[in-house]
Image: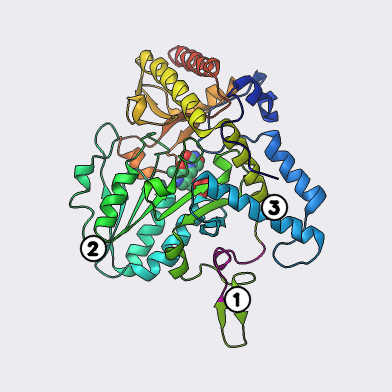
Amino acid sequence: MSNPEFGSRVFDVDAIRADFPILQRKINGNDLVYLDNAATTQKPNQVIKSLVDYYEQTNANVHRGVHTLSIEATDGYELARTKVAKFINAPRPEEVIWTRNTSESLNLVAATWAEANVGEGDNIVITAMEHHSNIVPWQQLADKKGAELRYLPHNEEGLIELDSATGVIDYRTKIVAVTHMSNVLGTINPVAKLAERAHSVGAVILVDAAQSVPHMPVDVQALDADFLCFSAHKMLGPTGIGVLWGKYDLLEAMPPYMFGGDMILEVTYEDATWNDLPYKFEAGTPNIADAIATGAAVDYLTELGMDNVWQHEQELTDYAMEQILSLGSVRVLGPQNPALRGGVISFIHDTIHPHDLGTALDQQGIAIRTGHHCAMPLVRSFDVVAAARVSFYIYNTKSEVDAFVSGLCETEGYFSR
Ligand code: 7TS
C-alpha cells in the first residue's frame, strides 16, 4: 500500500457524494441536507470499507504478536500514523500520538507538559473563542498550580488583533493554547504570528486544529507549532480516535499520561521505565481499526487535495453568507469577510429561537446545529444563550445552501403567522 498522490482526483462533488451512503437517506420524507459538519462529518465508503476489511480480514492485537495477523495489524496501524504525519508535514511519525479525540489530546498536554512546566505565578494564555475542551483543562490546571489563565480578546468582527497580545503574552507565559479556526465564529487565527510571540518569551504554543486540519492545508512546521490536536471524526474518519502531534524533544521530555501495557520498556516489582515515542503515550490496546480507517480518511482527502477542499468550502461559504445576509433578519457572528473565515456560519435570528429553527428545518430534512456549540462564554458574550450554525464540507452543494435558505424563509413565514 502506498500513499495516494496529492490532488490526484478531480474535485467532482457529484462523484464525491456518491461515496457517502448516508446522503441517500430521507429525513422526514425529504433528502438529507447535512449542514452540521463542524460537529462531525459523514463517512465515505472507503472509510467504512476500511473498518469492515480490518475486522473481517486482519483483526489482531498490535506490537505483541509474531503471527501474520498481528504483523498485518501492526503494519496497518503504523502506516496510518505515517499518513497522518505526512498530512500535517510532521518531521517524524513518532511525533504523532493516537488519542480518543481533540479533547483527550488537549487534556494530555495539560496533564503532562503543563503539569511539569507551569508553576505558581505563571500564566496560561488562551483566546476568548475557545471550545470548552480548550478552556476547562486550563482552568483546572491554573487553579491547581496557582497560575493565571489569561484570555486574548477579539474585536467586534471576531478577529484577534496581534496588538492585543502585547501585555497578555509576557515573560511569565508558559503556554499559549489557541484554536486555529473557531467552531462558532469561523475565524482563522494568526497562529504562526502567535507562535512567534509565544516563542519570543520562551513559551510553547498549542494549536487546537479540530476545525482546521479537516478543511485546509495545515503544516505544523510552517506554523512553528509545538503541539497540535485534532479529531478524525471531523475529517471523514471514525469517532473515538484523534491525534496529538508534538515536537519530538517536548514529547520526549514529558511524563506519561496513562500507565499500563505497551507504554513501558521494563517493569520490575518496584519500578518501571518508559517506552520510546510514540508508545510512551499509548497505554493499553489502542484503537487499531479506527486508526487504520483514519489513514483511509487521510488518503481520501489527500487525493482530493486540501487546497481544493478549502476552495470548495470558500465558494460555498461566500455563497451562503451572501444569501443569509441578504435576508436582513439575521445577525451573523464572526467576520463577514469570507477571506478571513472558514466554512462555519453561526447566526442569530431576530425573532426565531435557534432551537425552533433547528426543529423546523429538521422537518425538511435539513440538519443544522443549535445551542452554545460548547463555547458558552463566547456565545454568551453576544448576549444570547444559543445560536444556530451551518457548517460545510466536501459533499455540500450550492443547491443545499438554497434549500437551507428557503427552509429558513419558510420557517419565518410560519412563525409570523
Ligand atoms: N476544539 C474545537 C475547535 C472543536 O470545534 C471541537 C468540537 C473540539 C475541540 C472537541 O472535539 P472532540 O472531537 O474532542 O469532541 N466541536 C464541536 C462542535 O462545534 N459541535 O460539536 C462538536
Residue ranking furthest to the bottom? 270
The residue beneath circle 1 is: 265
Q: Is residue 266 above or below residue 41?
A: below
Q: Which residues are magenta?
A: 274-285
Q: Earlier in the sequence, mark 2 or mark 1?
A: 2
Dot 1 falls on a residue whose secondary structure is strand
Q: Residue at x 69, y 65 (%)?
A: 63
Q: CA distance from mark 2 to mark 3?
A: 43 Å
Of the numbered discs 2 and 3, the one sitting upstream in the chain is 3
For residue 304, which quarter of the picture?
A: top right
From the image, give the main secondary structure of the stretch colored magenta. loop
Quadrant (top left/top right/bottom left/bottom right) for the C terminus: top left
Residue at label 3? 76
In the rendered image, which residue does mark 2 sit on? 172
- Separation of disc 1 and disc 3 at Cα? 23 Å
Q: Quadrant of residue 262?
A: bottom right
Q: Is residue 324 left or right of residue 39?
A: left
Q: Nearer the viewer, residue 29 or 125?
A: 125
